[in-house]
Amino acid sequence: MKAGLISSSTATLAVLLAVICQAVYALEPMEDDALSTVIGADGVQLTLRLRNNVDDSGAPMGCSGFLNPCRLGLEFSGREGIWLMLKDYYGTLSINDVRLESAVLPSTSTGFQDASRFLDGSGTCLLAGCDPRGIQAVRISYPMYKGTGEYQDLLLLMNIGRTALEFDNGLTPGYLRDAATGSALGFRMADSSGLNAPSAARFDGAAYVFGF
């Protein structure tokens, strides 16, 4: 499958490193040499943001009218020259405050351990006692008690105003045409509180990633 995309996407990755220090008096810039000696003690907190054809406030940027640039075109194998076009296409995605930290697997049994997954080709278990409990892992979690902003873990806005087929026409590929005046499908996911307010969701719990 090939994809033709005309978009003004902007992606921002904000990474906050939590560092335990004996004394902190103020936030000050650090030189590269000093920064290289810093060791993360608590963990890492990530915020991931993606904007596609929208500005900082979530308002679409030129996504209306004939042949506007907010388009995603899909051309499938065996159907060359025929493009499935998503028009008036814009949105935003924000995943906030994902926490990564060092941990050990819980010592209590969850009931979901499958010892067969730790066997090598000869049937020998690669773990002592074939039990992963208590070994080192990376813990991925969201904070349980959030207070203000409780339902801000994930924010999603997605709009597809029109869906239609466009066909290559001589030197002009279908993804650069707007000949189809109708629409087979429209899609929009947003909060009812505002025209371009993203839907909000809350996540709780934790996942552990480990190796041996």
Image (cartoon, grey):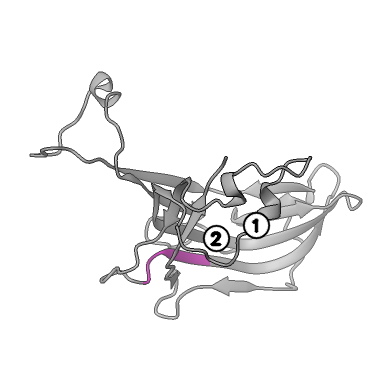
Residue at image position (71%, 73%) is 185
Residue at image position (84%, 49%) is 169
Q: How crowded is mark 1: few (under 14 residues within 10 Å), some or many (20 or more)?
A: some
Image-quadrant location for residue 30: top left
Residue nearer the viewer, 122 or 71: 122
Seen as rendered, the residue at the extreme front is 129
The reply to whether dot 2 and dot 1 touch (C-beta < 8 Å) is no
Assign the C terminus to one quadrant of the image: top right
Label 2 vs label 1: CA separation?
14 Å
Q: Which stretch appears magenta?
A: 151-157
According to the image, label 2 marks what residue?
Answer: 90
Q: How crowded is mark 2: few (under 14 residues within 10 Å), some or many (20 or more)?
A: many
Question: Left or right: where does residue 146 sit relative to residue 189?
Answer: left
Residue at image position (42%, 46%) is 12
Label ID, residue 149: none
Tell whether position 72 is magenta.
no
* Image position, residue 91 (x, y; %): 52, 61
Seen as rendered, the residue at the extreme top is 33
Image-quadrant location for residue 112: bottom right
Seen as rendered, the residue at the extreme left is 25
Q: Which element is circle 2 on?
A: strand
**2 or 1: tag closer to the N-terminus:** 1
Which amino acid is tagged 2? Tyr
According to the image, label 1 marks what residue?
Answer: 67
Q: Which element is circle 1 on?
A: loop
Residue nearer the viewer, 98 or 120: 120
Rendered view: 98 above or below 13: below
* Image position, residue 16 (x, y; %): 32, 44
Residue nearer the viewer, 37 or 161: 37
